[in-house]
Image (cartoon, rainbow, N blue to C red):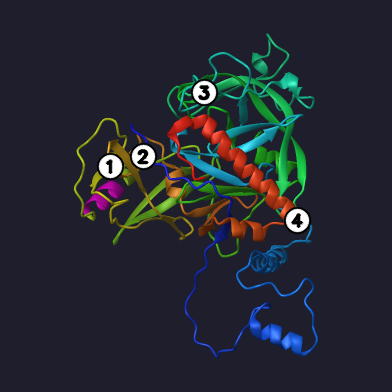
Amino acid sequence: MTSPLLNSLLLLFACVVGRGGAALTMRSLEFHHRFSAPVRRWAEARGRVLPGGWPAPGSTSYVAALAGHDRHRALSAGGAGSGEPPPLTFAEGNATLKVSNLGFLHYALVTVGTPGQTFMVALDTGSDLFWLPCQCDGCTPPATATSGSATFYIPGMSSTSKAVPCNSNACGLQKECSTTSQCPYKMVYISAGTSSSGFLVEDVLYLSSEDAHPQILKAQIMLGCGQTQTGSFLDAAAPNGLFGLGIDEISVPSTLAQKGLTSNSFSMCFGRDGIGRISFGDQGSSDQEETPLDINEQHPTYAITIYGITVGNNPMDLEFSTIFDTGTSFTYLADPAYTYITQSFHAQVQANRHAVDSRIPFEYCYDLSSGEARIPSPDISLRTVSGSLFPVIDPGQVISIQEHEYVYCLAIVKSMKLNIIGQNFMTGLRVVFDRERKILGWKKFNLQVTMLIVQALYPSTHGIRQASHLQRLRITLLRKLGTQLVLPS
């Protein structure tokens, strides 16, 4: 299948939750912000002097001062000083990026070991273990213009790396320890024939606090030293490792919560332009939509119960369980949910259906005329057991089938049994995986991607560090993708 057009913006951003509400009729008062002309005249008439002078409207210092004030208010409202640790993110920055050339997954830069070594890893809520490719033959995709050459984690090169012994309580494969003193691991994934195996080590992961005074900290975590990868891992997906975000105790979110470094929760934002954000310890907002997680203690996943589906103006009561998995690019549904959504969608679309193409995994695709980016399509929402509606912002995927010819597909794959809400159904939302309260939360959000806003939200030193992260992410992607990805200058 030919990759669709990739129009990625490599800009640092802030994740701003959208607001909404009913209109109210009220008596009016006239408000002025603290740097407005009326306030300035009032202050100067009373001999009040603003330290540093009055910033010019529209200037960087003007926006920075306003945003800095808002940031401190937000921190106060969020419980700063209440004893709760601030959210954490990766020391290299909180940005994530969806890359079509690398399996349509969201990637982030993480730094591990002493001295620190940086890897671009895929983020996966459908598995638990964080693993990196170790120095080995045939454990990563061949070096190509698409995948580039792999970066290897070498335990012996890190002074803080320690092998996990077989007698450790964290070793789940003690029965296979007869030939080695190091604890082995093997992870098998849903994708056919896809696995990773090797041995477990402990090392430090570099994180940064997300508060008014960001600080770098080193967290002792467990990770896999991947010696053998199979399936999709040898076909460009996650060539530099996978960052498991699952519920099991071995995952990094679990480790951070156990050590008291964050709350037992994290959030991910998924922008429509492929830019995202991750924050450990984020429990969302009081006005987000929520539904209980159905946690199977033997095989814990981020599963919820759906009670109904609405496509356009057609609601249908359907009860089924589904897993939220950021490591799955698209959404997989079994019948009857699959047939109901696809046929209801098709019945309400006024576009020419494209002939079935064996190269495309989606059944319902539509021809795009010149200049079209998508087709008018009905809204889709999922009604959860709590009664909250989970909105599907854009269920489609544009695919290039040949030069200057594109189709828009309903990006749902028919599954035999499992129902999986993939990354495409989470686009346009901030999704909160709150393991402490055992709920899944979500809310629509907007990404502000101008460097002016970024400079205003962060102190100067933090802004410099974030800008450095942005440049490193740009360089890493260019090395991985060669000429296949065109980046803005």
Q: Are marks 2 and 3 in contact (CB under 8 Å)?
A: no
Alpha carbon distance from label 3 to label 4: 38 Å
Alpha carbon distance from label 4 to label 2: 43 Å
Alpha carbon distance from label 2 to label 1: 8 Å
Q: 43 or 324: nearer the eye?
A: 43
The span shown in magenta is 339-347
Q: Earlier in the sequence, mark 4 or mark 1?
A: 4
Q: Which residue is mark 3?
A: 195
Alpha carbon distance from label 4 to label 1: 50 Å
User: Can residue 292 be seen at all in this image of the molecule?
Assistant: yes
User: In percent of the image, x 48 and y 24: which residue is there?
Assistant: 194
Left-right relation of 331 to 41 = left
- Residue 249 screen position, x and y as percent: 66, 36
- Residue 133 screen position, x and y as percent: 60, 23
- Determine the secondary structure under disc 2: loop
Q: Earlier in the sequence, mark 1 or mark 3?
A: 3
Q: Which residue is mark 2?
A: 4
Q: Are marks 4 and 2 in contact (CB under 8 Å)?
A: no
Alpha carbon distance from label 2 to label 3: 27 Å
- Determine the secondary structure under disc 1: strand
Q: Could you say which disc has been placed on residue 84 in the image?
A: 4
User: In percent of the image, x 55 and y 57: which residue is there?
Assistant: 450
